[in-house]
Amino acid sequence: MEIWDGHCHLSGYAGTPDERVGKLVALADRMGVDRLCIFMGANFHYDPTPEEMRAANDEVLDGLRNWHHHAFGFVYLNPNHLDASLAEFARCVEQGPMVAIKLWVAQHCDSPDVDAIVTRAAAAKAPIFQHTWQKITGNLPGESTAEELARLAARHPEATFICGHAGGDWENGIRAIRPHANVYADLGGGDPTAGFTEMAVRELGAERVIFGSDIPGRSYASQLAKVYGAQITEEAKRLIFSENLKRLLTPILKLKGVPVY
Amino acid sequence: MTQELIDTNVYIGPWPTRRVPGDDSAALTEMLRGHGVTQAWAGSFDSLLHKDIAGVNARLAQACAASGGLLVPFGAINPALPQWEDDVRRCAEEHRMPGIRLHPNYHGYALDDPRFTALLQAAADRKLLVQIAITMEDERMMHPLMQVPHVDVLPLPDLLAVHPGLRVVLLNAFRGVPMPLVQRLAETKQVCFDLAWLEGAAGLEVLKKQIPLERVLFGSYAPLFYFASSWLKLAESPLSETERAALMCNNAAGLLAAP
């Protein structure tokens, strides 16, 4: 079964970006994963300066150079630096090889500051991957919840969103995004708790669930198990493992002249 | 030859805040057999919050007896309850359990509590294997009315020195126990760890540079975790046949066979 991984990072490995992507690809090969979506650099910055943003994106661009047949890049932006973010979007996506946006914890995603980024993304057919988590132990100051992403998605029905970690507290997150057909649930990054994928498929439909690993912080084993181990149909597994992400990225890949098989 | 697979970390019964596939013992048994598990050491989720621990253990023993030998019961002991010593006796004498499974964080005592010291002594006297569950759930995901910290095992090395024959397995340890302490515990040669909560890319390849794999046991934490998570960890890291056999069976079998 073909597997596209919508959630990978360059952190955790030593070496140049090229070497780090090489290590990710080698591990992916070992585990039967065909394509990787990579975002953010070796060092994670909660609220990156424009310089830190550019440096993180440069690492990904460097890493993709020799591995573009195995990996895609998502541009890391910070709504607190809107002009710099839009310039990065132009450099990395509109004029560069990247195919989507990553927003992390700098700003709550239902802030009006995010609207201009979403509008540009929708025009370029670039999906937006928004980290979300709802922690009973307390969120980071700018950390978004799935409910906040649902509010953003309601304002932008023309845009496509991936709800990172399915809200973290996925039993809440899945409910929050359920009414919004333009929001997809990322399975990556949490524990391999049984029932997670089954609930996502039951409430959202298999067409709105996307495999992601959050590698290398997480184990491929624990993340692949969420799909391999779920009591869902083989067709649902095929959609989650590759077809849904492929469908989301096809418009922008076509614009860039990248063939999709 | 068929490879034996001993799963040292499964539970029967429903998790307190969620139903998951396989949370009745018949379904769990069928699922484990389907994955090639030849023996599974089982505790009961009921033991986390129930106060009638003797009843919990009796039901656990009954469920394991009905599994055709697949499930091996590890009874719960709560040393904060009156007459806990009799629960130890029943586990050993009536139910013939090879070990006990402790949840100090859910039962409200620390490992420097004198009651825990007495419990270790009782286990040592009866040659019971002691499992301690360090973490049951990601602390960020807990129900607001059931927020439970990881078990702090810092007192354990000194306690083990008093009981050189005691064998301890820490379950779900890799989220809540810092690696230097894991290494210190591994050096005692009295402590093993199951791999259910081992995370990170190629986790076993990384772990075997930190502690000897003879200290690591296969454990799935099924049915709360997808069984495939632990199973795939054996494929994610390059392992020799000897290492695979040790993880899958030999390390755990050695614990039960130890005098």
Image: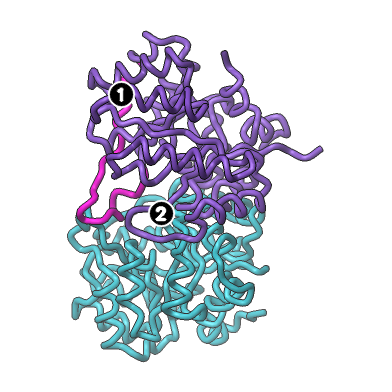
Q: In the image, what residue occupies the spot 31% across and 66% down?
A: A132
For label 2, the residue is B14
For label 1, the residue is B154
Image position of B68 with respect to B124: above or below: below
Q: In the image, what residue occupies the spot 60% across and 80% down?
A: A258
Q: In the picture provided, is B203 more to the left or to the right than B156?
A: right
Chain B on-screen colour: purple
A84 is within the stretch colored magenta: no
Identify which residue, A252 or B181, lies in the foreground: B181
Q: Nearer the viewer, mark 2 or mark 1?
A: 2
Binning the other alpha carbons within 10 Å of mark 2 as few (below 14), some (14 to 19) or many (20 upward) gives some
Q: In the image, what residue occupies the spot 52% across and 27% down?
A: B96
What is the x, y in percent for residue A100? Answer: 44, 75
Residue kind at label 1, given as amino acid type: Leu
Kind of element beneath mark 2: loop
Binning the other alpha carbons within 10 Å of mark 1 as few (below 14), some (14 to 19) or many (20 upward) gives some
Q: Quadrant of residue A125?
A: bottom left
Q: In the picture provided, is B83 more to the left or to the right than B234?
A: left
Q: In the picture provided, is B149 more to the left or to the right than B257?
A: left
